[in-house]
Image (spheres, rainbow, N blue to C red):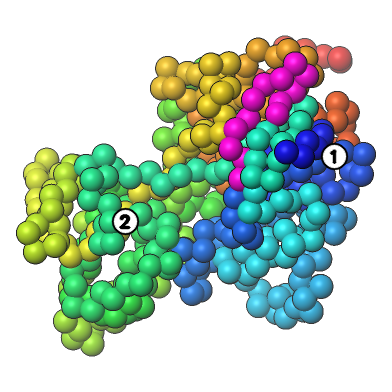
Amino acid sequence: MNMDEVDLAGVGVGPFNLSIAALADEVPELRARLFERRERFAWHPGLMFEGSRMQTSFLKDLVTAVSPTNPHSFLNYLVSHGRFYSFLATEHAAIGRREFADYLGWVASRLESLSFADEVREVRSTRDGFELIHDRGRTRARCVVLGTGRVPSVPACARQHLGPRCFHAIDTLTRPLDLRGSKVAVVGGGQTGAELVLELLRGTWGEPARVTWASRRLNFEPLDESPFANHLFTPEFMAMFHGLEGARRESLLERHKLAGDGISLSTLRALHDRAYELGVSGSELRLDLLPARELIDVEARGSGGFELHLHNLLDETNEPVQADWVILCTGLREQLPGCVEPLLAELEFDAQRRPLVDRNFELRRPRRGNERLYIVNGGRSTHGIAESQLSLMAWRSAVILNDVLGRRRFDIERERGLIRWQAAPSWAARGEAC
C-alpha cells in the first residue's frame, strides 16, 4: 500500500471538515488530506425540499467569519456564478438550502486536499501521531480531525419496524414514495417535521387521506431568532459554557433548545396557511395536529400498516394512531465513527458515555507527544447548542488550525461581544486599573 505523510488528516467531508479544508487551503505550509467514502460531496440530499431555506445567515459560510478574503466564500461563489446583483435583489434574510448546498459542492470541487470514494477503515495510534488505513492506501498524520457528522436518532420502539414504510426522514427524497390515499404519521416537531408535513399537504407524493403530526413538544414552536438569543452562537458564550460543570450545561441545553432547534416562522406560516386553505376548499385530506404527544410504542398491523401508541403529556392519557406510513423526524445523534475503535480505550467519557471534548475541540486522551485528535460536531454536551450548527463553523475551524500549526495564523479573538457572560475580574468590578 502507498504511505503518505501529512500534518492534518480528516475523516469525513461534510460542511464542518470542508470548512477546515477551505481555510487550510490558504496555509501552503500545512499538508492536509481529508477522506470521504462518498464519490462526491453531498449535504443531506434527502431533505432538499423545494423552497426550504437556511436558518442561518449566508455570511456564516465556510470561511468568512475568520478570513473574509478567502476565495472559498459564499460571496465569491455568487460572483463566480454571475448572481451577485440578482442575489442582492432578492433581499432574503436566509438563502435557500439548495443554493447553499450548491455552494458547498462548488468549494469541494476546488480543493485538491479532498479524497472522495476513499473511506477510512481504521485509525491507529503511533509513536508520533496516527496511521489511517483507507481504501487507497495508508496515511501517517500528526493530527486527525473527525468530521463524519451525526447519525439518525430512531426511537427504540420503532427500530424493529424500519423499512420501506417506516423510516427516518433524512433520506426522504431518495425514496420512491406514492402516498395517495394513505394515512401518514410524522413523528417529531422540529424544522424537518414541519417541512415534511408541509410537503405532504402540498401533495408532493400524491394527496394522502390523512396526515398525523405528533410532537413531544408542547406546541409547534418557532425558532428563537431574536437578537440576544443569537448571542448564544458566539465564541464568548461557547467559552463560558465549556467552563461550566456538567449538570449546569445539561440544564442550559434544554433551556436554549428553541434557539437552535425551533421551526422557522416562515415555515410555520406557510404550513398554517396551507392547512387553512385545505379546510376552505373542502379537501378530504384530514390533518391531525398532536403536540405534547410522546411516542411510546409502535406495533405492526397485519395489513402492512402500523399502530402508534402516543402518550399525552398534558392530560396523561394514551391514544392509538393508525398509519400506513411512519416518517421519523426525530433528529440526529452524535456517534464516533467505527474507524476509531482502536482508540476508544484511550478516550475519556462522561457518565453518559459521551466523549469529553476540550475547549480547542480536541478529544480528551493521554498524549504521547504533539499529536492531536479533534472532533467537529461531536461536543454539544461540552460546547453548547452552537456546536452542531453552522454559525461558528469557520471560527471553530480556525481554532483547530491554529492549534495544529502551534501559532495564531487566524485571528479568533478580535471581536468583543455585546454581552458579558462571566463575572468581571475583581479589579474591574472595583474600577481599579490593571
Residue 257 visible, this angle: yes
Marker disc for residue 167: 2
> As drawn, is 6 to the left or to the right of 159?
right
- Residue furthest bottom as drawn: 281
Q: Determine the main secondary structure of the stretch shown in magenta.
A: strand
Residue 360 visible, this angle: no
| Among the two numbered marks 1 and 2 on one chain, the one whose residue lies closer to the N terminus | 1
User: Residue at label 1?
Assistant: 31
Front residue (pair 29, 431): 29
Contact, mark 1 vs mark 2 (Cβ under 8 Å): no
* Residue pictured at 53% horizontal, 36% vertical: 337
In front: mark 1 or mark 2?
Answer: 1
* Residue pictured at 87% horizontal, 55% vertical: 69
Q: Secondary structure at mark 1?
A: loop
* Residue pictured at 71% horizontal, 51% vertical: 115
Quadrant of image for the C terminus: top right
> As drawn, is 171 to the left or to the right of 226?
left
Q: Secondary structure at mark 2?
A: strand
Q: Position of residue 204 (x, y in %)?
A: 36, 78
Quadrant of image for the N terminus: top right
How many angstroms separate mark 1 from mark 2 (CA)?
41 Å
Crowding near the residue tagged with mark 2, few <14, some 14–19, many ≥20 C-alpha atoms within 10 Å: many
Above or below: residue 305 compared with residue 210: above
Three-letter code for the amino acid on which mark 2 is drawn: Phe
Marker disc for residue 19: none
Q: How many marks?
A: 2
The image quarter in which residue 178 lies:
bottom left
Q: Position of residue 428 (x, y in %)?
A: 77, 18
Question: What residue range appears in magenta?
Answer: 119-131
The image quarter in which residue 209 lies:
bottom left
Q: Position of residue 168 (x, y in %)?
A: 35, 54
Three-letter code for the amino acid on which mark 1 is drawn: Arg
